[in-house]
Amino acid sequence: MKVGKHKKGVELCWVFVLAALLLKQISLFVLLEPMFQHMCRHLCKMLDTMFQHPGTV
């Protein structure tokens, strides 16, 4: 059960990654990319915490 929830969080993160690849066509996004990657990592950590310890986030 926990693995399924975790997998869903990872899939959500991949949606952000795919969106990033699409947005790469916009030159301005190249400047924002490091910030975007940091946000994605932070989001994945937050999702992991949420799924492992419900109610703490």
Image (cartoon, grey):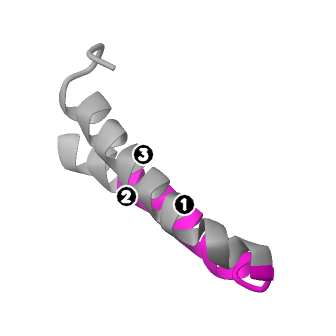
Give me the disc on residue 43.
3
Residue type highlighted by circle 2: Val
Residue 3 spot, x, y in % from top left: 21, 49
- Give, as a single range, the part of the protein colored magenta: 8-27
Task: Assess disc 1: are there few (<14), some (14-19) or many (≥20) residues with their C-alpha within 10 Å of its C-alpha.
Answer: some
- Quadrant in the picture for the N terminus: top left
* Residue at figure coordinates x 49%, y 68% from the top left: 34
Q: Quadrant of residue 22?
A: bottom right
Confirm whether the magenta stretch covers residue 19. Answer: yes
* Residue 15 appears left or right of 3: right
Residue type highlighted by circle 3: Leu
Residue 32 spot, x, y in % from top left: 63, 66
Confirm whether the magenta stretch covers residue 18. Answer: yes
Task: Assess disc 3: are there few (<14), some (14-19) or many (≥20) residues with their C-alpha within 10 Å of its C-alpha.
Answer: some
* Residue 27 appears left or right of 53: right
Establish if 54 lies above or below 51.
Answer: above
Give me the disc on residue 10.
2
Observer-nearest residue: 2 or 27? 27
Q: Quadrant of residue 15?
A: bottom right
**Marks 1/2: CA–CA distance:** 16 Å
Which secondary structure lies at badge 1?
Answer: helix
Residue 4 spot, x, y in % from top left: 29, 49
Q: Residue tagged by mark 1?
A: 36
Which secondary structure lies at badge 3?
Answer: helix
**Marks 3/1: CA–CA distance:** 10 Å
Q: Quadrant of residue 31?
A: bottom right
**Closer to the N terminus: mark 3 or mark 1?**
1
* Residue at figure coordinates x 26%, y 16% from the top left: 56
